[in-house]
Image: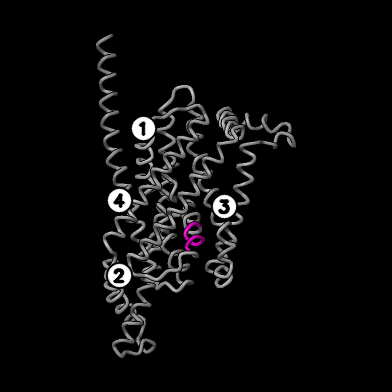
Amino acid sequence: MSRLRKGLSVGLRVGFCLLLLLWIFHSIFLSQGKIAAQNSGLDWNRMDRSQQWRLAWTTGPNDLWHTLRLIQPLALLVSLALVGFTILAGVVRWRVVLEAQGLHLPLNRATSISFVAQFFNSFLLGSTGGDLIKAYYAARETHHKKTEAVTTVFMDRLVGLWSMLLFAGMMMAPNYAVLRASRDIGVPAVFILAMFVGLTVVLAVAFWGGVSKGFPKARHYLRRLPKGDLLERALDSCRQFGKQKSFLLKTVAISLMVNVVWVVQIIVLGQGLGLTIPPMPLFVIVPIILCISALPLTPNGLGVRENLFVLMLAVINVPKTAALSVSLIASAQGLFWSLIGGLIYMGRRQKEHLREVTQTSEAIKEN
């Protein structure tokens, strides 16, 4: 019964993702169809709905494909390299988190696990679904600190998200006029600030505690929860982060650098498509989009991200088709690196299978 519920839940989210994509493609194609009708001397308003839709889905995909083909190869390669750089920077940040727990994971091992997580991010919910797989592999890397290893994965993600929220908040001041100009950016900006405040409270409690001072029996009730001993151990491991003054400084510095690279990547894509996009608004628009699309709403944030790109870039006069092209190319570049992670995953599975077979054979021989 639980499997059926999980299947239905995933199916509903995938369906929601597809509906979002269908809606954004349809709305953009309608706009392109209206332009095509005007260029052909047709009266769009006198056409019935079926004629409008037929024209939209006839001209829209061609216009989108034409826009996608405009990307300059050099810009495409530079943008692709920047996406890869963000993954590698994430590996460095995770190793800092691991070191704070006394866990030492070789760079090549941490890199392969991170790429495998990137692979699973492609079809799991939100843009952080691969963290579950990453936590699984992290736990397998140690025998005595499995809980701490799993905690590092989620703490790494939370610190990264908090830094992105911080970055978006800092960029709101120089972009105040843009935020006031449209609710399409202003409302999400308020939501981002609310997320920042909420996550700040969560991290402060996790790192430095304080709940047990107001509620002395908090630990007692925590132990009575299912897997309460593991939850308490995870909480104690979080306290280790708060005790190290340099931990937040290092991880936040790396995260802020990653945020800048994400914005530069979109700037490069825009230039490669021949778009005139003012760079400053992107420093608030891009992190807002990344933060919201990280929520577990659709697989890999697909549909949510595209809608946000179209809505927000329209505020700074970027055509809808061009904005969608930017989003689709950025998503495709993420999928490219996911493919690398998939190849690594298949290699890991084969090696681990051979190792298990060898160990089983040796155990049989000994008996």
Q: Rate crowding at label 2 as few (under 14), some (14 to 19) or many (20 or more) other CA atoms within 10 Å.
A: some
Q: Of label 2 and label 4, which has the lower sequence position?
A: 2
- Residue at 44% across / 51% down in the picture? 126
Q: Nearer the viewer, mark 3 or mark 2?
A: 3
Q: Badge 2 is on which residue?
A: 67
Q: CA distance from mark 4 to mark 3?
A: 29 Å
Q: Badge 1 is on which residue?
A: 109
Q: Nearer the viewer, mark 4 or mark 3?
A: 3
Magenta stretch, main secondary structure class: helix
Q: Badge 4 is on which residue?
A: 336
x, y (%) of residue 365? 24, 11
Q: Secondary structure at mark 4?
A: helix
Q: Badge 3 is on which residue?
A: 166
**Residue 314, quarter of picture:** bottom left
Amino acid at dot 4: Phe
Q: Quadrant of the N terminus?
A: top left
Amino acid at dot 1: Arg
Q: Of label 1 and label 4, which has the lower sequence position?
A: 1
Q: Of label 4 and label 3, which has the lower sequence position?
A: 3
Whether the residues at callouts 1 and 4 have beta carbons within 8 Å, the answer is no
